[in-house]
Structure formats: C-alpha cells, structure tokens
C-alpha cells in the first residue's frame, strides 16, 4: 500500500484527499505514467473528448494510451456495472450502490490502472472516484468524506494527476442522454437528483482547483478539446 501524505484538514471538507498525486515512478529511459480522468454529468460529452485526447497524446510522445471507464474496464468490473445500471434493481440501497462502485473500482485499479502507470503509460478514465463523491456522497447524501474513506482502500493510493470536469446543466445532459438510447438506472433518476449531481461537481471542483479543472461543456467539440489539451499540456510541462 502506497503511503501518501495528506494536506491539512479543512472544516469545509475534513477528508481532504482532493490533491494531485502521481503514483508511477519514472524509470530511466521511460516516460512517467500519467493518470487523467474525465468527469461530468451524464450527457456532458466525456467519451468524445476522451477519444480526442487519446489521439493527441499518442501524437505527442505516449505510444500507448490506456482508455478505460467506470464502472467497468475489466470483466469483473463490467459485471458489477451490469448490476449497478440495471433498471430492474430499483430497490438498490444507496449504501449498496456505493460499495458496488468501490468494488468495481478496486478491480480496475489493480488490473488496469496500476499496471499501466507502473509501465509508464498514459491512462484516461471516463469517471473515477470523484463520480462516487458526487453521485453517492452528495446527490445520495451519504457524505463526501465517507465516500473517499471507503474508496481509499480500493484505490491503493492512486489519484488522478488531472481531472477534467465537463460542466453542463442537468437538463441539457439528460436531453442528450435520452436521445442516444434508453436510460439506465442512474440516468433514469429524477431531474432533482441530476441537478444535485451537476452542482455537486461544481462544488467539488471549487474545493480542489489545482487538480480539477472545469470546462464549459456547452461549447462546440473542438473548442472543448482545445481547452482540454491546454490543461494537459500545462500538466506535462510541469513534470
């Protein structure tokens, strides 16, 4: 287990784990692994931006870029995803939901993210622990501190180097999601729930401005991509 020094505690956010931390150690002749995450409400355009960012990184030094998603990314984690997003499980308790997300995350970290970072690869994840902080911690009301404490065991000390938050009004994201396909169990939550999610991301980003960068997702795809690249290049230049 990798020990990481925590910054001073805050009365606003007592479990202050929202800091940047590179896990992978740089090896002689090998690029340092970089862990990037994309967060935002449903329908915010994360998938599109991740694919464009992957292409950019491969053109600028990273010959291998691992793209993954949450929940999912491994056979076991995808099986857990099937349970979490199944609309037939409407009776799922909020605590059960939080634990299942953490379990899927633990497998993804152990099987995909940690090995890739150790090998000096770039990893881009469509959602990570901040999703749990927002969806379960804030929107479900379980508490952000409890969610980060729960996931500390699952993450093995690995935190994103940079998190891109694609900010989008809840009603816009829901409209986009509905136009794609039938809504899953999480997407089918109430409008009030999704409004809490959208605001929750804004509040979380305000607490960790050095790691979480907010980008207006109502802009066109290329403008958003340019802003994403700018933030990633800024991170790389500082390494």
Image: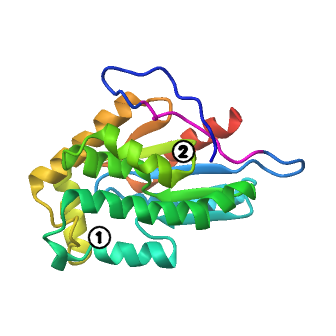
Above/below status of 135 relative to 10:
below
Q: Quadrant of the C terminus?
A: top right
Q: Which residue is mark 1?
A: 84
In the rendered structure, does residue 17 fall within the stretch colored magenta?
A: yes
Q: Nearer the viewer, residue 204 or 89?
A: 89
The residue located at (50%, 70%) in the rendering is 73
* Residue 188 is inside the magenta segment: no
Report x, y in % for residue 24: 70, 48
Q: Give 205 or 91, whichever is nearer the viewer.
A: 91
User: Could you say which quadrant of the image residue 233 lies in?
Assistant: top right
Q: Which residue is identified by label 2?
A: 159
Residue that appears at 21% across and 65% down: 187
Real-space CA distance between mark 2 and mark 1, rounded to the nearest whole angstrom:
23 Å
Q: Residue at x 21, y 57 (%)?
A: 94
The boundaries of the magenta stretch are 16-25
Instruction: Tell which of 217 and 203 is nearer to you.
Output: 203
Residue 147 in the figure: left or right of residue 108: left
Q: Can you give x and y, in whole percent of width and height, for residue 52 in the image?
A: 54, 60
State which quadrant residue 213 falls in. Answer: top left
Across and down, in percent, residue 177 comes to 24, 67
Q: At numbered mark 1, what does the secondary structure look like: helix, strand or loop?
A: helix
The percent coordinates of residue 68 (x first, y second) are 52, 66
């Amino acid at each position: 287990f990798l020990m990481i020094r925590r910054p001073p505690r805050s009365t606003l956010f007592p479990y202050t784990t929202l800091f940047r931390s590179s896990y992978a150690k740089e090896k002689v002749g090998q690029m340092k692994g970089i862990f990037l995450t994309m967060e935002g409400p449903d329908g915010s355009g994360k998938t599109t931006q991740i694919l464009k960012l992957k292409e950019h990184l491969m053109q600028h030094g990273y010959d291998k870029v691992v793209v993954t998603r949450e929940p999912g990314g491994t056979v076991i984690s995808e099986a857990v995803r099937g349970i979490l997003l199944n609309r037939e499980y409407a009776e799922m308790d909020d605590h059960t939901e939080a634990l299942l997300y953490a379990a899927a995350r633990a497998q993804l970290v152990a099987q995909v993210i940690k090995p890739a970072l150790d090998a000096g690869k770039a990893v881009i994840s469509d959602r990570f622990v901040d999703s749990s902080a927002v969806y379960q911690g804030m929107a479900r009301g379980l508490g952000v501190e409890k969610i980060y404490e729960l996931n500390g065991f699952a993450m093995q000390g690995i935190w994103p180097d940079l998190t891109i938050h694609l900010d989008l009004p809840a009603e816009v994201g829901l409209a986009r999601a509905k136009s794609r396909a039938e809504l899953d169990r999480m997407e089918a939550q109430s409008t009030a729930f999704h409004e809490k999610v959208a605001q929750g991301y804004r509040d979380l980003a305000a607490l960790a401005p050095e790691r979480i960068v907010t980008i207006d997702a109502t802009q066109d795809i290329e403008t958003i991509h340019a802003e994403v690249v700018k933030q990633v290049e800024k991170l790389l230049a500082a390494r």
